[in-house]
């Protein structure tokens, strides 16, 4: 029987869960805003935290966590909206 691996609560959360709407990850966040006047397309703004990135980079699980975070983001981006 395999033992359960316990990760930090932030494991796999470097990026937001979704690219749709405003969302926050541990390091990167995305916010969608309407242009001034409320007319036109939404504009996406991406923020990042150097402090949180440095915290992640010091973590023993950084390589696995980052790979998992990227995989989740790729899956989210590749699944068609229904």
Image: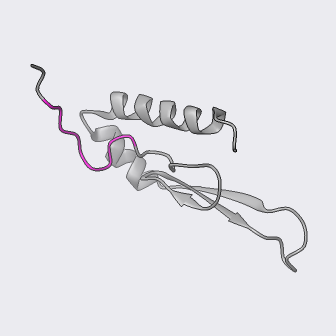
Q: Does 59 sit above or below residue 22? A: above
> Residue pushed farthest front?
82
Q: Which residues are magenta?
A: 4-12
Q: Does 69 sit above or below residue 19? A: above
> Residue pushed farthest top?
1
Q: Quick one: 7 or 76, which is closer to the camera?
A: 76
Residue in the picture at 90% in, 73% down:
39
> Residue pushed farthest bottom?
37
Q: Position of residue 43 (x, y in %)?
A: 77, 61
Q: Position of residue 31 (x, y in %)?
A: 64, 62
Residue in the picture at 37% in, 46% down:
54
Residue 73: in magenta span:
no
Rendered image quadrant of residue 36:
bottom right
Q: Position of residue 29 (x, y in %)?
A: 55, 56
Q: Main secondary structure of the magenta part?
A: loop
Residue in the picture at 65% in, 32% down:
78
Q: Quick one: 37 or 55, which is closer to the camera?
A: 37
Residue 5: in magenta span:
yes
Which corner quadrant holds the N terminus?
A: top left
């Amino acid at each position: 029987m395999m033992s359960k691996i316990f990760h930090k609560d932030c494991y796999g959360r470097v990026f937001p869960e979704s690219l749709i709407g405003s969302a926050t990850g541990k390091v990167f966040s995305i916010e969608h805003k309407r242009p001034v006047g409320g007319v036109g397309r939404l504009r996406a703004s991406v923020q990042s935290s150097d402090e949180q990135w440095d915290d992640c980079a010091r973590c023993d699980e950084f390589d696995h966590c980052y790979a998992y975070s990227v995989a989740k983001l790729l899956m989210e981006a590749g699944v068609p909206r229904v």
